[in-house]
């Protein structure tokens, strides 16, 4: 694999483009919003500069890494010669189904189609294509350049060949892939989101302030970030979408999204990306 297309240049897409470009791959970064492409490029540069300061990247390599990322606003333009496509558009099932149908039509027949979805069924996404054996979950963690894990999700029809190729590629990027089966929320969000949701309930019920809840979990459980700060990093809209999938797909009320989370999302308080969530951030 040499050419990678990344669809969606938001919180995750810019990081995914970053690690592939840093790994020497040519990357087509596709976002329908021109402004998102500009922000993605600026974020990749800022994060590369941070890696240079930490001695993780050679300063002379920065321009070459950025030069390997080409931006596109139309899916058809960016995927026609891609070996692997990683989708990172918002966590909305209908949006992903439509996009995978389009990708199946415009990407080379041999290309692997991967989704960075946090919770939507890979089997259902794959069923929208004529290549379900070459559809897989490649779930990077946020922030992508820093986090080691890639959760590799096998849909019902995903082939061994596809799984092995994605596991190997993840290792080449310096990541540690873990293979899991397709089930709502996979492992990561099946375990993480109920904890975040419970923290929001605790806040709503006045058990403690957001700062206090996060401090208890940081100092008491040795978590590097408290659950509310982590929700702000992930994006509160993304957290809500994942909880909706867990709730509807598993049919259990223990996954019902906290009303306070809904209220924040309705207000447009989405966390770091909007400057305000459970905590406030300078933008
Ligand atoms: P985001 O809202 O930050 O970015 C999504 C981007 O997709 C936006 O720039 C938007 O303009 C673009 N987009 C929307 N529709 C498009 C289309 N049809 N074609 C091209 N571009 C389109 O979202 P995000 O947080 O980066 O999440 C993306 C995916 O990654 C979701 O499936 C999410 O569940 C998953 N994920 C998120 C996190 C996280 O911490 N945020 C972690 C792991 C996985």
Image: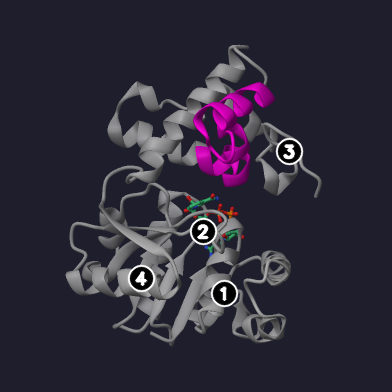
Disc 4 secondary structure class = strand
Q: CA distance from mark 3 to mark 1?
A: 27 Å
Give the magenta part as a residue range: 210-239
Q: Nearer the viewer, residue 163 or 126?
A: 163
Q: CA distance from mark 2 to mark 3?
A: 22 Å
Q: Nearer the viewer, residue 30 or 130?
A: 30
Disc 1 secondary structure class = strand
**Which residue is disc 2 drawn over?**
89
- Image side of residue 53 versus residue 232, left or right: right
Disc 2 secondary structure class = loop
**Looking at the image, is mark 2 or mark 4 earlier in the sequence?**
2
Q: Relative to residue 41, is residue 201 depicted above or below?
A: above
Residue in the picture at 53% in, 37% down:
223
**Which residue is disc 4 drawn over?**
113
Q: CA distance from mark 2 to mark 4?
A: 13 Å
Q: Nearer the viewer, residue 178 or 193?
A: 178
Residue in the picture at 56% in, 64% down:
145
**Is the residue marked by circle 2 packed among few (<14), some (14-19), or many (20+) residues within 10 Å?**
many
**Looking at the image, is mark 1 or mark 4 earlier in the sequence?**
1
**Which residue is disc 1 drawn over?**
29
Coloration of the structure image: one colour
Q: Relative to residue 115, is residue 131 depicted above or below?
A: below
Residue 96 lies, in percent from the top left, at 42, 58
Residue 73 visible in the shown view: yes
Question: Majority secondary structure of the magenta segment?
Answer: helix
Q: Do tag 1 and tag 4 residues touch (Cβ < 8 Å)?
A: no
């Amino acid at each position: 694999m040499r050419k990678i297309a990344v669809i969606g240049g938001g919180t995750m897409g810019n990081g995914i483009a970053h690690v592939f470009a840093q790994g020497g791959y040519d990357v087509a970064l596709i976002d329908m919003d021109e402004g998102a492409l500009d922000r993605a490029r600026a974020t990749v540069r800022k994060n590369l500069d941070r890696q240079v300061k930490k001695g993780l990247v050679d300063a002379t390599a920065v321009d070459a890494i950025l030069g390997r990322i080409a931006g596109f606003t139309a899916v058809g333009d960016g995927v026609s010669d891609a070996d692997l496509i990683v989708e990172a558009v918002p966590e909305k099932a209908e949006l992903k189904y439509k996009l995978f149908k389009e990708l199946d039509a415009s990407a080379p027949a041999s290309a692997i189609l991967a989704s960075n979805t946090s919770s939507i069924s890979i089997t259902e996404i794959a069923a929208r294509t004529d290549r379900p054996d070459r559809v897989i979950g490649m779930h990077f963690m946020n922030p992508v350049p820093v986090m080691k894990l890639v959760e590799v999700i096998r849909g019902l029809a995903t082939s061994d060949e596809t799984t092995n190729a994605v596991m190997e590629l993840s290792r080449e990027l310096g990541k540690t892939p873990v293979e899991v089966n397709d089930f709502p929320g996979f492992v990561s969000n099946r375990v993480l989101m109920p904890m975040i949701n419970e923290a929001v309930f605790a806040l709503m019920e006045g058990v403690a302030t957001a700062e206090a809840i996060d401090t208890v979990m940081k100092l008491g459980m040795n978590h590097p970030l408290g659950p509310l700060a982590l929700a702000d990093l992930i994006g509160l809209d993304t957290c809500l979408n994942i909880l909706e999938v867990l709730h509807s797909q598993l049919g259990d009320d223990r996954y019902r999204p906290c009303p306070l989370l809904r209220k924040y999302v309705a207000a447009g308080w989405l966390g770091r990306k909007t400057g305000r969530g459970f905590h406030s951030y300078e933008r």
